[in-house]
Amino acid sequence: MTDQQLDVIGFGNAIVDVLARAEPAFLDRHGMRKGGMTLIDEERAETVYGAMGPGVEISGGSAANTVVGVAALGGRAAFVGKVRDDELGGIFAHDIRAAGVAYATPAATTGPTTARCLILVTPDGERTMNTYLGAAQDLSPADVDENLVASAAVTYLEGYLWDPPAAKDAFLKAAGIAHRAGRTVSLTLSDAFCVGRYRSEFLSLMREGTVDLVFANEAELMSLYETDFDAALARLRGDVKRAVVTRSEKGALAVTADETAAVPAFPVAKVVDTTGAGDLFAAGYLHGFAKGFPAEDCLRLGALCASEIIGHIGARPERKLKEFAQENGLRV
């Protein structure tokens, strides 16, 4: 077994979030569905980006958010995701490295521009998202560093990467490397629509042992098995070695074939924005898992991290999660 150098390495879409305030009339003029998320092409992305008012730009993406959370807890994290050698690609690389995450995926010099999520926030706080995946979809097996993957206790894979064929191949290559090194491979199901597209393939990944640890929320779990929560949970136990299921205000569960651990949601004064809550829950759990903590301790760290994220706008932590955990009596 290779000596462990990293706690978690994440593979996912490298996306820059661009947030700007907008009036409802702006959404109407551009034919946007208020509160929704729409996948858009590059031409549309350039049009909307040019029309938006002054914005805040910060690197995002589900798995990227998770590894930033691991780093904020004091863990050793790396990220693999594709950007273009353009302005937004430079912003993504700068932000994730500044957060303490190792990032060395070579930027593309040709092809689509860096992925972006253009987020319009109306006066009522509602977020309307327009996502252009661009260069993120061009992640390939050539971007997988075998030594880096082999050195990580956990390889964390974003379900959204199952869309582009080359990224799927990179996903499978990383899983194989991790298993040959005796490591754990984890998958987040990403969202219920993603599960709907790839239900049979995700189940095969679990049942064939390609994935050891699955993260899902209630909607994703019920979509996976097309049944109610209790029946889906019972089937999940038999399909994967370990799973974590988040249930919003009802807390979270970690299950194996024979055991269940459960914790309540961590109290929060006010829910401001739930974007990124699942990503940061995964960060807390994986940090604890990589350190060998008991399941309940991993879940508590996850719940604490999720509570920090939902207390403000944006999917990246605004306070030092390690100190936040210590203040609440949790070991990190």
Image: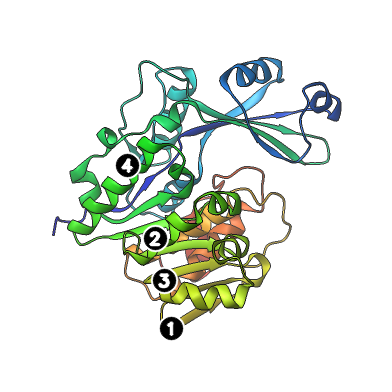
Q: For the residues marked 1 and 4, what is the alpha-carbon distance in whole angstroms?
A: 33 Å
Q: What residue is at 65 percent from the left and 53 percent from the top?
A: 310
Q: For the residues marked 2 and 1, what is the alpha-carbon distance in whole angstroms?
A: 23 Å
Q: Tell which circle, 2 or 3, labels the residue nearer the N-terminal end.
A: 2
Q: Which residue is mark 1?
A: 259
Q: Nearer the viewer, mark 1 or mark 4?
A: 4
Work out whether 99 lies above or below 137: below
Q: For the residues marked 3 and 1, what is the alpha-carbon distance in whole angstroms?
A: 14 Å
Q: Secondary structure at mark 3?
A: helix
Q: Nearer the viewer, mark 2 or mark 1?
A: 2
Q: Secondary structure at mark 1?
A: loop
Amino acid under disc 1: Glu
Q: Which residue is mark 3?
A: 239
Q: Nearer the viewer, mark 3 or mark 1?
A: 3
Amino acid under disc 2: Ser
User: Mark 3 and 4 residues: CB-CB less than 8 Å, in contact?
Assistant: no
